[in-house]
Image (cartoon, rainbow, N blue to C red):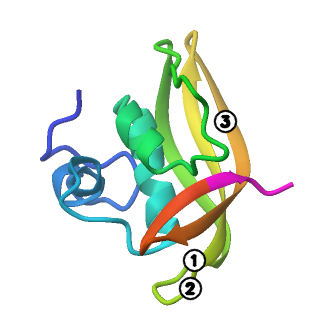
Amino acid sequence: MIIDESRCPCGLGEPYGACCGRFHRGTATAPTAELLMRSRFSAFAVSDTGYLTETWHPKTRPTDLELDPGRRWMFLEILGKTGGGLLEHEGTVEFRAHYRQDRRADSMQENSHFVRVDGQWIYVAPVS
């Protein structure tokens, strides 16, 4: 488990509690699609399935979310984005998420689609 004073996994360099931890605790909501993407990566890193489920569009989220306990999420690269700003209602964030599994480094890349529903950003699905 990550401690609030530890550096946030999202890569912004802030302490977890002041960065993505506030979103995970529900004391703030991500104001942009990119910050939601970063907070979701951090949720994977700290195994917060509740936050992942809450920020996943109900039409596309899995019915049962189980994280691989052998996968350790290491760092996130934001490769690009479209829309997703403070006054927008839709956006995409392309990222590469690096992880370790079975003592081997690997990564996955996705261009994710986000929408704002009732004032809050949520993840929809990969852009096809």
Above/below status of 87 relative to 61: below
Task: Tell me the residue at 64%/54% (across/down).
Answer: 124
Label 1: how many Cα within 10 Å (few below 14, some 14–19, many 20+): many
Q: Quadrant of residue 93?
A: bottom right
Predominant secondary structure, magenta span: strand
| Labels 3, 1: front one | 1
- Residue 88 is marked as 2
The three-letter amino acid code for the residue at tag 3 is Ser
Q: Mark 3 = which residue?
A: 107
Q: Secondary structure at mark 3?
A: strand
The three-letter amino acid code for the residue at tag 2 is Glu
The three-letter amino acid code for the residue at tag 1 is Gly
Q: Mark 2–mark 1 contact, CB under 8 Å?
A: yes
Instruction: Residue 59: give x, y in percent of width and height.
Output: 65, 47
Residue lying furthest right: 128
Circle nearer the N terminus (3, 1): 1
Q: Nearer the viewer, residue 108 or 124?
A: 124
Q: Nearer the viewer, residue 9 or 68?
A: 68
Task: Tell me the residue at 52%/25% (across/down).
Answer: 65
Q: Mark 1 = which residue?
A: 84
Above/below status of 67 relative to 114: above
